[in-house]
Image (tube, rainbow, N blue to C red):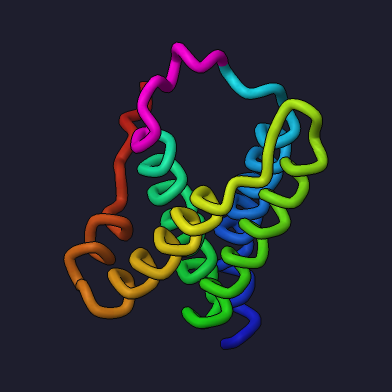
Amino acid sequence: MAAAAEKSNRPLWLATLMLLAIFAFSSSQKPPPAAILPLWHYDKIGHFGVFGLLATAWIRAGLRTPFAVLLVIAYSYLDETMQGLNPYRVFDLTDLLANSCGAIVAALAWQYWAHYRRILETRVRIPRR
């Protein structure tokens, strides 16, 4: 039975790893012009949401909640450190804080708010032509 559950989580693991690869690639690129994101809070809201969804993806893929949150926070720290080494980017402590808060809030929502789980577990049917 454990092998069947592990096999059914394989697509979720692959999707989550693809998210990490996309994050790593985007972090290594030159940032967009400041005119695109003129307000500070839009950036932080994005960090909060994206890293919250990343934590949720790890939990959904089968990791225990505390481990998933710690993994996302560690990845966030690594990501910010790598950005600090990039001549076009900087290590931003407020990004790290937004990422960590997003992971924690999403994990708590997953654990204690059934509506959040229902929304994310809703199957979307794509009509075939």
- What span is colored magenta in the figure? 33-42
From the viewer's perspective, is 14 left or right of 34? right
* Image: 26 above or below 79: above
Left or right of 63, for residue 42: left
Q: Magenta region's main secondary structure?
A: loop
| Quarter holding residue 119 | bottom left
Which residue is situated farthest in the bottom direction here? 1
**In the image, what residue occupies the spot 30% across and 41% down?**
125
Front-lying residue, 8 or 45: 45
Q: Would residue 35 be counted in the magenta stretch?
A: yes
Q: Quadrant of the C terminus?
A: top left
Q: Residue at x 42, y 57 (%)?
A: 52
Q: Is 40 placed left or right of 75 in the picture?
A: left
Q: Nearer the viewer, residue 105 or 38?
A: 38
Whether 109 is drawn above or below 91: the answer is: below
Residue located at (39% from left, 20% from top): 38
Where does residue 124 sit, x and y in percent of width and height?
30, 44
Left or right: residue 90 compared with residue 108: right
Residue 36 drawn at (x, y percent): 44, 15
In front: 113, or 86?
Answer: 86
**Residue farthest toward the left in the current orientation of the protein:** 115
Q: Quadrant of residue 74?
A: bottom right
Q: Position of residue 112 (x, y in %)?
A: 24, 79
